């Protein structure tokens, strides 16, 4: 296999992993605060359509990215008001948010079907990525580097900063955090907003970078994969990065193997691989401890109202 | 909106309607608008299969105006849930109902039995009744035309084909494409990737990239989104649009596209329902009938390729050329068609073998 093909595979792998990584990273922070938002797919779609609509109308991809973040936050706020202020059931509301997001994005996007824009290009000048191996390092777009920086940032925030500690405390024991005087609901609002922002950005990565267009249900279920990845990672950003790239690698390898005519392994097995890996990791993790809690935040999914 | 509006065929069949007008009985003219209902498997915004059917519905509105009233339900799951959607349309005063996906077959049969006075039409199915007709398009004819172009335009002699599921409809498309290309270039091969989905834009794009990495310089697809064309455009190789003209997504890459056009059939059948001459039956329309169209060739298509493609198209229209003509053997060497024999429809509808040159 030549270098050029290998590098091309790496580029595809990174690109297809990035939106899942972004959405999962946002959801990780949400869940660390004790909230389970299953509406990732809906928020991604709203971000995708808003990003495309703004980029198409203004001609600026940067504005499109900003719009996608805002749209993601706006969608997340619907969830936040219902579950945090009105203490609605988080699972039901999250599922409803996905359906809401599919419908809303379809409505907004109706006028944009069949349109296309110039895709989000590499951030570094082309001279840096002439050599194939340099291209694997410097040939990506801004969102890829941003997603990697965010992994570092979130990891540092959660484990090394005081606000990060407070956020985790809220997720582990909301009553105690409240008793010490932390604003549990406000902190959870902030976490849900952050999750919405990253899901929106992840969605826009489809409509602005991967497949620069709008079509209904453009993200085709990636939001659910992001949710699974959070569990896979045991709520650790570093492992999340690994999981997202592993998932992207298997998806890319599946297609490359088929294209190369590799027949010693059935394509169905390759298609199953990421899910098998998820089950295997979950099983290993729960074997390690008697409780079977899988390191989930203790208050995950439980509504909180100040006593 | 321009690209969408110009693709509609508002005036299609207008002449036929004018000719038919004197035949209309007084009763037909005096009646309230005829209700025409549709159920779609996907969103109308998919820019693919469901979208093309909805273009047909819009053509009806444009053609008949206040004489009919159309309605539709989109995103209807294949299987039992479709019966609910069909019943809803049947009870909402629709007299003619189109079920536009293969998986709607059993529910449509069931609901048609419950409403014997209403008329039903099922796309791509094979079960009929007195009030249930079936219709489909011979997309393989379009595949033969684009295969001819691919044979001329591919330098590597390798085409990539992004396929959904190994059902006869898809298999016959792959075979028709490859047979036509090998008539031009006997060493031509078609690499197939099974995407295991009709619609997943990001995966379709990645599949196209994988095929291009492996040296394919022409991409064809039997999945629904324009994502593969965008990938081809980005990598500087050629591709063909699917279901609709996808030129706007890949102005350099798209050599042509197979365009589904149901409007002519829908206008004809609704006219028959208005006239009272509607009968059940099975229609399998091709290029000649206007069901399948080819998008205008890209400027990059060489004169030789153009001439060859036009010759194939004209041969199919005149009936002189059938994309599946013997002598034809499958990959295992089994003789499928004797010399001079053409494939009967039953053979096409059950096709589960590949011709030489297909790497599936």
Image (spheres, rainbow, N blue to C red):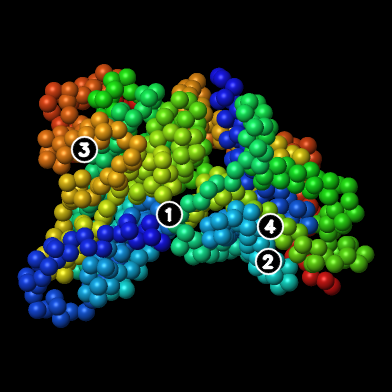
- Residue A197 is labelled as 4
- The residue pinned by badge 3 equals B310
Cβ–Cβ below 8 Å for labels 1 and 3? no
| C-alpha distance separating marks 3 and 2 | 57 Å
Cβ–Cβ below 8 Å for labels 4 and 1? no
Residue B213 in the image: state x and y as whole percent. 50, 28
How packed mark 4 is, by other alpha carbons closer than 10 Å (few <14, some 14-19, many 20 or more), is many
| C-alpha distance separating marks 1 and 2 | 30 Å
Q: Earlier in the sequence, mark 4 or mark 1?
A: 1
Chain containing the residue with disc 4 = A
* Front of the two marks 1 and 3: 3
How packed mark 3 is, by other alpha carbons closer than 10 Å (few <14, some 14-19, many 20 or more), is some
* Front of the two marks 4 and 3: 3
- The residue pinned by badge 1 equals A114
Residue A184 in the image: state x and y as whole percent. 82, 65
**Location of residue A98 (image quadrant):** bottom right
| C-alpha distance separating marks 4 and 1 | 26 Å
Secondary structure category for the residue under label 4? helix
- The residue pinned by badge 2 equals A77
Cβ–Cβ below 8 Å for labels 4 and 3? no
- Picture layout, residue B1 above or below residue B165: below
Cβ–Cβ below 8 Å for labels 3 and 2? no
Chain containing the residue with disc 3 = B
């Amino acid at each position: 296999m030549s270098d050029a093909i290998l590098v091309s595979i790496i580029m595809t792998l990174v690109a297809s992993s990035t939106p899942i990584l972004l959405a999962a990273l946002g959801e990780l922070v949400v869940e660390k605060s004790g909230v389970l938002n299953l509406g990732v797919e809906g928020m991604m779609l709203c971000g995708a359509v808003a990003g495309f609509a703004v980029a198409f109308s203004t001609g600026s991809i940067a504005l499109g990215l900003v719009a996608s973040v805002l749209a993601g936050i706006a969608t997340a706020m619907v969830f936040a008001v219902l579950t945090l202020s009105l203490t609605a059931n988080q699972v039901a509301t999250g599922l409803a948010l996905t359906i809401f997001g599919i419908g809303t994005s379809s409505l907004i996007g109706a006028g944009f079907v069949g349109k296309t824009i110039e895709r989000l290009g590499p951030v570094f000048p082309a001279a840096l990525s002439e050599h194939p191996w340099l291209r694997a390092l410097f040939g990506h777009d801004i969102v890829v580097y941003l997603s990697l920086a965010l992994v570092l940032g979130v990891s540092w925030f959660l484990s090394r900063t005081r606000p990060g500690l407070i956020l985790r405390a809220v997720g582990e024991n909301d009553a105690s955090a409240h008793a010490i005087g932390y604003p549990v609901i406000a902190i959870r609002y902030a976490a849900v907003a952050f999750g919405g922002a990253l899901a929106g950005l992840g969605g826009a990565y489809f409509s602005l970078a991967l497949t620069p267009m709008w079509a209904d249900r453009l993200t085709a279920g990636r939001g659910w994969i992001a949710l699974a990845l959070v569990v896979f990672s045991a709520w650790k950003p570093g492992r999340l990065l690994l999981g997202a790239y592993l998932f992207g690698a298997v998806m890319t390898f599946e297609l490359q193997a088929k294209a190369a005519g590799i027949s010693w392994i059935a394509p169905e097995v390759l298609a199953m691989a990421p899910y098998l890996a998820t089950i295997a990791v979950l099983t290993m993790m729960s074997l390690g401890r008697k409780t079977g809690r899988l390191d989930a935040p203790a208050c995950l999914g439980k509504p909180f109202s100040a006593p | 909106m321009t690209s969408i509006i110009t693709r509609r065929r508002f005036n299609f069949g207008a002449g036929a309607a004018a000719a038919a007008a004197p035949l209309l009985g007084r009763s037909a003219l005096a009646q309230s608008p005829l209700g025409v209902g549709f159920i779609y498997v996907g969103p109308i915004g998919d820019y693919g299969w469901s979208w093309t059917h909805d273009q047909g519905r819009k053509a009806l509105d444009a053609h008949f105006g206040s004489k009919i009233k159309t309605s539709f339900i989109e995103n209807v799951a294949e299987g039992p849930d479709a019966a609910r959607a069909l019943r809803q349309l049947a009870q909402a005063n629709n007299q003619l109902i189109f079920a536009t996906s293969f998986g709607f077959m059993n529910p449509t049969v069931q609901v048609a039995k419950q409403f014997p006075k209403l008329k039903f039409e099922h796309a791509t199915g094979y079960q009929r009744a007195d009030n249930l007709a079936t219709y489909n398009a011979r997309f393989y004819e379009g595949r033969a035309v684009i295969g001819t172009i691919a044979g001329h335009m591919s330098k590597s002699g390798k085409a990539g084909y992004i396929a959904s599921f190994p059902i006869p409809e898809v298999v016959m498309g792959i075979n028709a494409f490859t047979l036509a290309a090998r008539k031009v270039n006997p060493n031509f091969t078609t690499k197939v990737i099974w995407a295991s989905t009709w619609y997943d834009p990001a995966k379709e794009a990645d599949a196209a990239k994988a095929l291009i990495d492996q040296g394919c310089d022409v991409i064809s697809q039997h999945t629904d989104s324009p994502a593969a064309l965008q990938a081809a455009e980005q990598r500087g190789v050629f591709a063909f649009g699917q279901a609709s003209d996808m030129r706007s997504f890949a102005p350099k890459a798209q050599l042509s596209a197979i365009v589904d056009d149901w409007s002519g059939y829908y206008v004809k059948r609704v006219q028959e329902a208005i006239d009272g001459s509607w009968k059940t039956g099975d229609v399998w329309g091709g290029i000649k009938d206007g069901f399948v169209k080819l998008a205008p060739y890209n400027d990059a298509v060489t004169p030789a390729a153009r001439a060859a493609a036009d010759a194939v198209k004209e041969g199919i229209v005149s009936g002189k050329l059938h994309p599946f003509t013997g002598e034809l053997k499958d990959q295992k060497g089994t003789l499928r068609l004797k010399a001079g024999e053409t494939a009967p429809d039953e053979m096409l509808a059950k096709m589960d073998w590949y011709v030489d040159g297909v790497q599936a």
